[in-house]
Image (cartoon, rainbow, N blue to C red):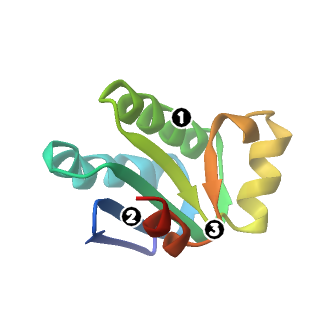
Amino acid sequence: MEEILVEKKDDIYLVKLSGELVLENVEDIKPKLENSLSEEWKIFAVDLAEIEFMDSSGIGFLVALSNRIKQMGRKFVLVNPSKQVVKTLKLVNIYHFFDLVEDIDDLILDL
């Protein structure tokens, strides 16, 4: 994982990932996001615009994170996923599982 940026914008907790979302990186990301789950926010958004490659561990990570956040009664969205991410999600037939938005500003307008 090249970089993990986290910011809180209004009631949105935004995580921006770049590089590859693969097994080795997923294990690094999990502890960094753990504290965020106890904070106050309505929407947890993961920006995947700069993800170049994602393997099954990356997909599993996103599915598990989405399920956990939904169980908390909050919303989980993927923001501006790269073409590679979209292709991968469609290939494994879980594209429809996620709420996707093109831009974080679209979420702010919905609050």
Give the residue at mark 2.
15
CA neighbours of label 3 inside 10 A, class few (<14), some (14 to 19), many (20+): some
Say which quadrant the C terminus sits in: bottom left
CA neighbours of label 1 inside 10 A, class few (<14), some (14 to 19), many (20+): some
Between residues 83 and 102, which one lies in front from this camera angle? 102
User: Along the horizontal axis of the image, is 48 left or right of 1?
Assistant: right
Q: Mark 2: which secondary structure?
A: strand
Callout 1, which amino acid? Val
Residue 80 is marked as 3
**Image coordinates for residue 9, horizontal then vertical, percent:** 30, 71
Separation of disc 2 and disc 3 at Cα?
12 Å
Residue at x 46% of width, y 37% of height: 66
**Image coordinates for residue 2, horizontal then vertical, percent:** 45, 75
**Image coordinates for residue 53, horizontal then vertical, percent:** 67, 61
Whether residue 80 is situated above or below residue 63 in the rendered picture: below
Callout 2, which amino acid? Val
* Sequence-earlier tag: 2 or 3: 2
Between residues 20 and 93, which one lies in front from this camera angle? 93
Q: Nearer the viewer, mark 3 or mark 1?
A: 3
User: Along the horizontal axis of the image, is 68 left or right of 110?
Assistant: left
Give the residue at mark 1.
63
